[in-house]
Amino acid sequence: MGKIEMTYANAIKEAISEEMRRDQNVYMLGEDIGVYRGAFGVSGGMIDEFGPERIIDTPISETAFVGCAIGSAVAGMRPVVEIMFSDFMAVCWDMIINQAPKMRYMFGGKVSVPMVLRTASGGGTGAAAQHSQSLEAMLCHVPGLKVVIPSTPYDAKGLLKSAIRDNNPVMFLEQKLLYRTKGMVPEEEYTIPLGVADMKREGKDCTIVTYGRMVHMCLAAAEAVSKEGIQTEVIDLRTLLPMDKPSIIESVKKTKHLIVVHEAVKTGGLGGEIAASIAESEAFNYLDAPIKRLASEDVPVPFCPILEKGVLPDEIKIAQAIRDVLA
């Protein structure tokens, strides 16, 4: 199988383009995604291939165009919606929480809502408090949604193709600082099943469970402490809902230590859910130390780059957390 290097952003573009060529019911809509190429350049050139009937520039009304996508999905289309920043999900919260995930259940399975809602999340870009949040835990509280957050171009393309083909609403979160990162992607057709975690690094001393941009931070931290003789296992969840809890449990049973790392704030974050899952499982009896959560501080994300860096987790903080858990 041949491979080619591409950016995270181009991997996402390829996934959507391939699915649009494969299925005429797939289309894309969002603010400034046509000629302007989207806020992060993901859809560059797509309007030239597919035209304005399938690459639809919408008014600045998330409620309107997400609602439109839900209606078209129920009618048999497969919309891929782009919301510029994940913070703006709050504008159309009713559509995301009360409409899309509930319809299949409330209509007794007679309808499905096959749609993907893509959005850029996370901090590190100096975009301030209203454009830098990580809100994935709020989404994971809603039965009926699937929540995906890839960390590499390979994962982004394979997971997005699976999300587009899924018959349920899928929230697809793309952390902004990953768009220009590069990785190897197969030239041939491939998909990655939703709900399956990936072991990004094998180790025997400590398990780190993480996702998104923090995967790269955790791998860097694991490499740093390896010079001290510490072998850290890094589990990339990839899909947050449904979560691959068996993979986490098996890793913790092996390493007997667990750290959960995410960019979202600690209070109410996914780290608490993962820790509780271990506490309720057989893996709890294997632990040699308390579970540690490493997350952003419980404050709005600052605009000032120095303050923002202080608020977010980084490889230095993660490396120290590994040492602390094993002390």
Image (cartoon, rainbow, N blue to C red):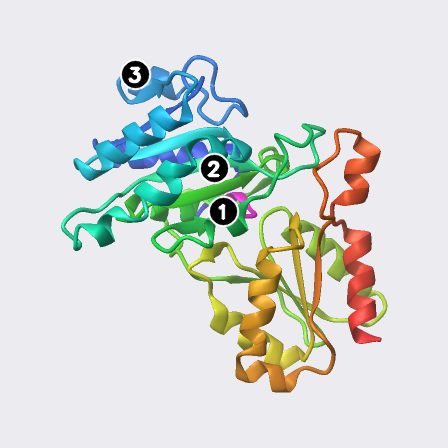
Which residue is painted at 82% across and 72% down in the image? 229
Cα gap from disc 2 to disc 1, whole angstroms: 7 Å
Front position in the image: 17 or 123: 123
* Residue linked to disc 1: 154
Badge 2, how many Cα within 10 Å: few under 14, some, many 20+? Answer: many
Badge number at residue 51: 3
x, y percentage for residue 322? 78, 66
- Left or right: 111, with 251 as reference point: left
Q: Name the residue type under label 2.
A: Ala
- Left or right: 84, with 265 as reference point: left
Marks 3 and 2: which is nearer the front? Answer: 3
Is 64 inside the magenta-drawn segment?
no
- Left or right: 226, with 287 as reference point: right
Q: Can residue 80 be seen in this view?
A: yes
Q: Is 48 located above or below residue 232 in the figure?
A: above
Which residue is painted at 72% across and 75% down in the image? 290
Q: Can residue 1 be seen in this view?
A: no
x, y percentage for residue 132? 63, 35
Badge number at residue 11: 2
Badge 1, how many Cα within 10 Å: few under 14, some, many 20+? Answer: many
- Left or right: 224, with 209 as reference point: right
Front position in the image: 272 or 210: 272
Which residue is painted at 82% across and 68% down in the image? 323
Q: What stretch is highlighted in magenta?
A: 149-153
Cα gap from disc 1 to disc 3, whole angstroms: 27 Å
Q: Do the residues labelled 2 and 1 touch (CB within 8 Å)?
A: yes
Q: Name the residue type under label 3.
A: Gly
N-terminal label among 1 and 3: 3
